[in-house]
């Protein structure tokens, strides 16, 4: 049996893959956080709750409407995005002239309300959600059996990050978005509807969280608190990567997932805290974050 | 869009009050009320309020007077709570020594995290403090001395200085009240010291304070450490009084609750955190049987406060009476 | 109120003002920056706003564009009131601003910068016409906005609004920090735009540059219009101008 530093190759590759899949979730979530931050200058503390809402939408669509995973993958992000747009228009937009910390507190409160309501409606325990039939079973990769669904999640996460990146970097809408992120006032003075752009940005950012939630439903069970721990890790990621670049958010997300996976192999006790330790190191060495521009 | 940004604490400090005298009177009234309280309300309930009031005062020191929003103060509260519970239960230390142990750990933790977190400002600072607190949470979940999911239960209250037996609720109440009053007075002294003046200057305009030769970084770290210490004092006292230290004390929800208390009562006021703590603890007690509704109600209070009531209760009173409270 | 009446005769080709600013006041927070600005601009005119730094010239442009949140008075553009409109609506009515420091977007390529402002009216220039004015831009189409020289950035900032069909152009310090040869090119461009019938309000520090282009100079001091001097009266008013500009 091949071993690396005393660890069987199978175990190592297996954990790497699990890490990369987790990294996919990190990347999708921190991508949303970064896009929203660029435009609104707020950190969306409700992001985890909206991720959970996406997972629950999938569960609700299946159990109440008989709509399977594939429908959920389309419908849930739209619903979550619309919820986000309503929240932005009715609540968040009232605080743009105040210290940004107020909006952070507001999104924290909104997160509590959303999670609380789901707990009241559906209880706190986990709900099982099976992967779609087409993605059942496992692939023999030689070194391990990869559940097809997990492979699918990894591929979808990669592709959707790429698509989002292309939309932002290569389309007209993306150009509006980048321009408004730099100087919203001048964009407004060109006759472009910046408030609409802001609402779409928030809606789009949280729709990504909802999308991640649907992908997560068959892997982790669906429960109201599922977004919390994940969110805090994503915040640490955001500090590590810095909020300067979309590309940075994606790269940091995947890399940190993989680093976490490796830690599970070599020093399992630290696997839950390694991200925070890395954050501390980055704060010491490059406080603005690896891809950050601002001081 | 010219965004005339208002600082998060500007609301509470937008006027210069004529005198400090009312604070003294209100303080005496508060103490008088607290002396009577255990005879009209459950002493345990009032003690809980006092512990959280002290915790909120600690956060307010950082948020209200330093303009720094920590979203991870449960780390200092909870870790100190664990350490003092452990010291009292496993090492058999007296309550005052157990509390000292807890506070010492909180101070060290505050120094380490403070040195790191202070390198960023605003929302980054909030995220960093939250992340470090989560690290402490995971540590508490795994470390053997915390009792994991069960926490440390049945912590002996012991005898203060090995003389004063604290098993009676009312005796214990006077001790907790004394700690609270000392804590309150401590924050008052800090706010009104020359150091507090410099903090005001830094919060007003950091660059200017820096150009005047103040080592802003050190002032902020010191504030962070002091705030962590007071949070530790609150956590340790709570562990001894309620004979319990659990994961709840170190969870992110606790960090959120203490922010809520400070916000509701009034950031940057000396009485606001006390009022806020009383309200939130009372609300939790009365709504406890409603389960998850507590969470929803807290979220709604957060949203309403932030959208319409940013000065908090005491902040509004201070504004209308034009007194510093 | 020390409002100077328009001493210069409006150009004869039009008797209806395109832009009619009356008693415009504006605030930044507590500071009362514009304290009653009134002037008219006629179609096809090039008008400069002269004055010292801090007199309120940029704020006047920004108020016309709707970028100053607290403003009162009246700004009629093409006969309709814009004082209560948003910057977005004002832009849609055919006014465009070339801001101070150009505001070229760093994360956008030159092409994206050029195509960013939406077309608001018919009759805007095609990209080819814009390249005719600024040949440099054609070669730099795929460079990031900030890789351009200061002069190229200025050309881009002007070029991108010519596409939109806006007929009133507000130019804020277009020659600031530019080499003399580039200043001349900008000058030729402004003259060309004037020939094509654009109406231009120019804030300019470089009086020699402005004097060759403008039909009229409006002098602003401490948030008020204190004088108006037609181009043909400049020579006889040299001493007064020196006094106004503090040179």
Image (cartoon, rainbow, N blue to C red):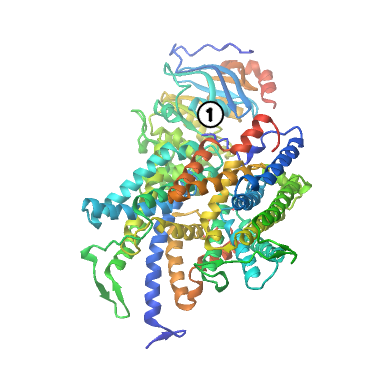
Residue at image mark 1? C68
Q: Residue at x 56, y 64 (%)?
A: B136
Q: What secondary structure is marked by label 1? A: loop
Q: Residue at x 69, y 38 (%)?
A: B325
- Quadrant the C terminus of chain C occupies: top right
Work out whether residue B282 or residue B147 is closer to the camera in this orientation and state it: B282
Subunit of label 1 = C
Residue B103 sits above or below residue A268 on the image: above
Q: Residue at x 47, y 44 (%)?
A: B297
Q: Residue at x 58, y 20 (%)?
A: C218
Work out whether residue A161 or residue C225 is closer to the camera in this orientation and state it: A161
Instruction: Estimate the x, y position of residue A112 in percent, counting from the top left.
Output: 45, 49
Instruction: Please indicate whether residue B13 sits to the left or right of residue A130 in the image.
Output: right
**Badge 1 local density, few (<14 within 10 Å), some, or many (20+)?**
some
Instruction: Estimate the x, y position of residue B291 in percent, counting from the top left.
Output: 43, 51
Residue C142 in sight from this viewpoint: no
Residue B196 in sight from this viewpoint: yes
Residue C203 sits above or below residue B154 on the image: above
Furthest residue in direction bottom, as rendered: A1
Work out whether residue B221 or residue C185 is closer to the camera in this orientation and state it: B221
Instruction: Please indicate whether residue A157 sits to the left or right of residue A235 in the image.
Output: left
Instruction: Please indicate whether residue B119 sits to the left or right of residue C91 in the image.
Output: right
Instruction: Estimate the x, y position of residue B151 in percent, counting from the top left.
Output: 54, 66
């Amino acid at each position: 049996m091949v071993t690396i530093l005393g660890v069987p190759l199978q175990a190592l590759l297996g954990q790497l893959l699990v890490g990369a899949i987790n990294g996919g979730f990190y990347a999708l979530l921190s991508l949303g956080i970064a896009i929203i931050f660029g435009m609104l200058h707020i950190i969306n503390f409700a992001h985890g709750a909206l991720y959970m809402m996406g997972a629950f939408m999938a569960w609700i669509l299946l159990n109440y409407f008989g709509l399977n995973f594939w429908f959920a993958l389309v419908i849930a992000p739209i619903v979550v995005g619309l919820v986000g747009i309503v929240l932005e228009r009715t609540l968040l937009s009232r605080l743009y002239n105040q210290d940004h910390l107020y909006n952070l507190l507001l999104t924290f409160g909104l997160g509590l309300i959303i999670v609380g309501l789901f707990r009241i409606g559906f209880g706190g325990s986990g709900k099982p959600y099976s992967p779609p039939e087409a993605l059942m079973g496992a692939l023999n990769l030689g070194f391990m059996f990869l559940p097809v669904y997990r492979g699918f999640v990894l591929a979808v996460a990669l592709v959707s990050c790429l698509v989002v990146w292309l939309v932002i970097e290569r389309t007209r809408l993306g150009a509006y978005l980048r321009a408004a992120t730099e100087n919203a006032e001048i964009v407004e003075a060109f006759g472009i509807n910046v408030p609409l752009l802001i609402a779409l940005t928030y809606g789009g950012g949280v729709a990504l969280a909802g999308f991640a939630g649907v992908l997560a439903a068959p892997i982790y069970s669906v429960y109201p608190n599922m977004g919390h721990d994940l969110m805090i890790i994503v915040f640490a990621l955001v500090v590590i990567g810095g909020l300067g670049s979309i590309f940075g958010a994606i790269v940091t997300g995947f890399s940190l997932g993989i680093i976490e996976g490796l830690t599970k192999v070599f020093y399992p006790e630290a696997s839950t805290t390694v991200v925070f330790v890395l954050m501390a190191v980055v704060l010491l060495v490059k406080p603005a974050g690896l891809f950050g521009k601002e001081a | 869009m010219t965004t005339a940004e208002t600082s998060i604490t500007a609301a509470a400090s937008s006027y210069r009050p004529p005198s400090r005298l009312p604070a003294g009177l209100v303080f005496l009234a508060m103490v008088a009320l607290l002396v009577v309280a255990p005879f009209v309300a459950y002493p345990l309930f009032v003690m809980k309020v006092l512990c959280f009031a002290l915790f909120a005062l600690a956060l307010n020191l950082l948020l209200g007077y330093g303009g720094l929003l920590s979203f991870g103060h449960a780390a200092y509260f909870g870790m100190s709570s664990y350490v003092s519970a452990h010291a009292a239960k496993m090492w058999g230390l007296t309550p005052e020594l157990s509390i000292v142990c807890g506070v010492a750990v909180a101070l060290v933790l505050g120094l380490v995290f403070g040195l790191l977190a202070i390198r960023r400002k605003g929302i980054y600072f909030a995220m960093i403090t939250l992340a470090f607190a989560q690290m402490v949470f995971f540590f508490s979940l795994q470390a053997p001395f915390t009792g994991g999911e069960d926490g440390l239960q049945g912590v002996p209250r012991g005898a203060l200085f090995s003389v004063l037996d604290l098993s009676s609720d009312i005796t214990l109440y006077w001790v907790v009240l004394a700690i609270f009053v000392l804590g309150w007075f401590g924050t008052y002294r800090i706010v009104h010291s020359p150091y507090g003046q410099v903090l005001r200057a830094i919060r007003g305009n950091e660059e200017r304070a820096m150009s005047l030769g103040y080592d802003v970084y050190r002032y902020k770290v010191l504030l962070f450490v002091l705030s962590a210490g007071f949070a530790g004092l609150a956590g340790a006292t709570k562990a001894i009084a309620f004979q319990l230290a659990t994961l709840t004390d170190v969870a992110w929800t606790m960090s959120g609750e203490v922010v809520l208390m400070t916000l509701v009562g009034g950031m940057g006021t000396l009485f606001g955190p006390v009022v806020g703590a009383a309200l939130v603890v009372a609300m939790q007690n009365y709504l406890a049987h409603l389960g998850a509704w507590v969470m929803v109600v807290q979220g709604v209070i957060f949203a309403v406060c932030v959208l319409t009531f940013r000065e908090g209760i005491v902040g509004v009173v201070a504004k209308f009476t034009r007194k510093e409270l | 109120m020390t409002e100077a009446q328009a001493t210069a005769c409006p150009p004869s080709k039009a008797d209806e003002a395109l832009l009619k600013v009356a008693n415009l006041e504006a605030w930044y927070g507590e500071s009362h920056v514009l304290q009653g600005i009134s002037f008219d601009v006629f179609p096809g005119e090039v008008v400069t706003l002269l004055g010292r730094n801090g007199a309120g010239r940029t704020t006047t442009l920004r108020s016309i564009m709707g970028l100053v949140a607290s403003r009162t008075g009246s700004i009629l553009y093409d006969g309709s009131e814009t004082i209560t409109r948003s910057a977005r609506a004002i832009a849609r009515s055919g006014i465009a601003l070339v801001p101070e420091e150009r505001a070229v977007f760093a994360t956008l390529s030159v092409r994206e910068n050029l195509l960013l402002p939406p077309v608001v009216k018919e009759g805007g220039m095609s990209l080819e016409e814009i390249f005719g004015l600024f040949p440099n831009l054609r070669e730099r189409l795929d460079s990031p906005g900030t890789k351009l020289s200061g002069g190229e950035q200025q050309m881009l900032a002007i070029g991108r609004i010519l596409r939109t069909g806006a007929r009133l152009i507000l130019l804020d310090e277009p020659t600031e920090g530019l080499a003399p040869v580039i200043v001349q090119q900008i000058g030729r461009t402004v003259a060309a735009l004037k020939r094509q019938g654009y109406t231009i309000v120019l804030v300019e520090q470089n009086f020699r540059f402005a004097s060759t282009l403008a039909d009229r100079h409006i002098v602003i001091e401490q948030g008020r219009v204190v004088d108006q001097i037609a181009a043909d009266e400049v020579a006889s008013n040299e001493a007064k101008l020196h006094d106004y500009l503090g040179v």
